[in-house]
């Protein structure tokens, strides 16, 4: 792929912390043979999956850099073989910048649009320094099966899925029309989600919960040290799901529980997550806490802060399923409106509730 190398003091200063640091590679997809002739609303055009993945692979092998997707690309499951589980798979020290373009998932691809080399092994070496900036990423949900490869024994088709990471940033990203969960974060540390939106074009028609499972941000433990700023979702399920586990018994696959074959973990603690500025944009459910008993006990929640939560909800504003105790939980600024005026919060060692909309009933416990 033809690479535009930004060399010299003036350009160096714009992409690094100073001219004394190593220059970073910036690759423009439009200059590397990618057609980028799709439409973000209707798809079509040339399948750029292999062209874009080749560019990403080169950046990974050279130690990192930025891939600029500067028009709209069509991607598919062309790369989903062996260990690759998503249409595009990024890696350590790679930034994907789609600010001037976007990505459309081709019909019947039945895979997530973007992720990393998914790992559920708690002892695995994490990928680091991954970043996604800007763009509309259209999952084309109407033309995907709910399960990967249309196989009922495989995972659901998410929008983005990152698992096994230490350092992940999403900024200014719109994940549109994912088949099920918009963004899955699992088995990771140190993430920042900022100015990001999960949206479905047909949300008004389906947001009396019909089993579409359109979560916004779905967090699976073990997960720690994360921040979410200025996020909104109009999906028909949880906007924020804190799932320490979902009843999987041990660190081995248990497909009989949730029909999943690449999540070899039972879950674990979700800790040190700070949320500030979330809008429930007519979603069915708001916040869900989940922690079911296993032989290892119930995985914990610890040090969770929710600030400035607003918007409207169609069904359940907040519900707790199985979390019997947690570390500090702070909810400061709950201004959510809808037909139900109660929120169910896990029992916590230090539960701080402030600026709650008048009339909201708070219950504590499972």
Image: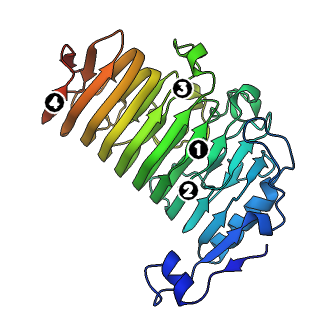
Answer yes or no: do the residues labelled 2 and 1 have beta carbons within 8 Å?
Answer: yes
Q: Nearer the viewer, mark 1 or mark 3?
A: 1
N-terminal of the pair, mark 3 or mark 2, is: 2
- The quadrant where residue 36 appears: bottom right
N-terminal of the pair, mark 1 or mark 3, is: 1
Residue matched to label 3: 257
The local secondary structure at tag 1 comes to strand
| 149 with respect to 197 (left or right) | right
The local secondary structure at tag 2 comes to strand
N-terminal of the pair, mark 4 or mark 2, is: 2
N-terminal of the pair, mark 1 or mark 4, is: 1
The quarter of the rendered structure image containing the C terminus is: top left
Q: Which residue is located at x 68 percent, y 37 percent? A: 139
Q: Which residue is located at x 41 percent, y 32 percent? A: 241
What is the C-alpha distance between the residues marked 1 and 3? 22 Å
Dot label at residue 132: 2
- In the image, 302 versus 104, the foreground residue is 104
Residue 85 in the image: state x and y as whole percent.
68, 47
Q: Nearer the viewer, mark 3 or mark 2?
A: 2
Q: Is residue 338 above or below residue 335?
A: above
What is the C-alpha distance between the residues marked 4 and 2? 33 Å
Farthest residue, direction right: 46
| 288 with respect to 107 (left or right) | left
What is the C-alpha distance between the residues marked 1 and 4? 32 Å
């Amino acid at each position: 792929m033809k690479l535009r190398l930004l060399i010299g003091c003036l350009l160096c200063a714009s992409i690094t912390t100073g001219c004394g640091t190593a220059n970073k590679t910036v690759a423009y997809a439009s200059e590397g043979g990618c057609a980028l002739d799709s439409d973000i609303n209707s798809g079509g055009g040339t399948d750029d999956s292999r062209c874009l993945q080749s560019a990403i692979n080169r950046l990974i092998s050279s130690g990192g850099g930025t891939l600029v997707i500067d028009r709209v690309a069509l991607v598919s499951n062309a790369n989903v073989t062996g260990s690759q589980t998503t249409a595009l798979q990024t890696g350590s020290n790679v930034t994907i910048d789609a600010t001037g373009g976007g990505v459309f998932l081709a019909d019947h691809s039945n895979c997530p649009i973007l992720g990393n080399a998914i790992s559920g092994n708690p002892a695995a070496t994490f990928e680091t320094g991954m970043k996604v900036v800007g763009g509309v990423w259209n999952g084309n949900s109407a033309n995907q099966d709910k399960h990967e490869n249309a196989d009922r024994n495989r995972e659901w088709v998410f929008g983005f899925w990152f698992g096994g990471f230490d350092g992940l940033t999403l900024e200014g990203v719109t994940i549109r029309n994912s088949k099920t969960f918009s963004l899955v974060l699992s088995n990771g540390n140190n993430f920042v989600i900022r100015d990001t939106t999960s949206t479905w074009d047909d949300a008004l028609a389906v947001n009396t919960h019909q089993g579409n499972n359109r979560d916004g941000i779905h967090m699976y433990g073990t997960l720690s040290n994360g921040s979410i700023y200025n996020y909104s979702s109009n999906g028909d399920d949880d906007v924020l799901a804190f799932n320490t586990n979902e009843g999987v018994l041990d660190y081995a696959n248990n497909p009989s529980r949730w029909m999943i074959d690449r999540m070899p973990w039972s879950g674990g603690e979700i800790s040190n997550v700070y949320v500030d500025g979330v809008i429930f944009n007519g979603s069915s459910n708001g916040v869900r806490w989940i922690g079911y008993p296993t032989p290892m006990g119930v995985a914990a929640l610890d040090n969770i802060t929710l600030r400035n939560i607003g918007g409207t909800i169609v069904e359940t504003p907040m519900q707790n399923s199985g979390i019997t105790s947690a570390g500090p939980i702070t909810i400061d600024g709950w201004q959510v409106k809808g037909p139900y005026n109660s929120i169910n919060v896990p029992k916590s060692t230090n539960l701080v509730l402030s600026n709650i909309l008048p009339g909201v009933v708070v219950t504590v416990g499972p």
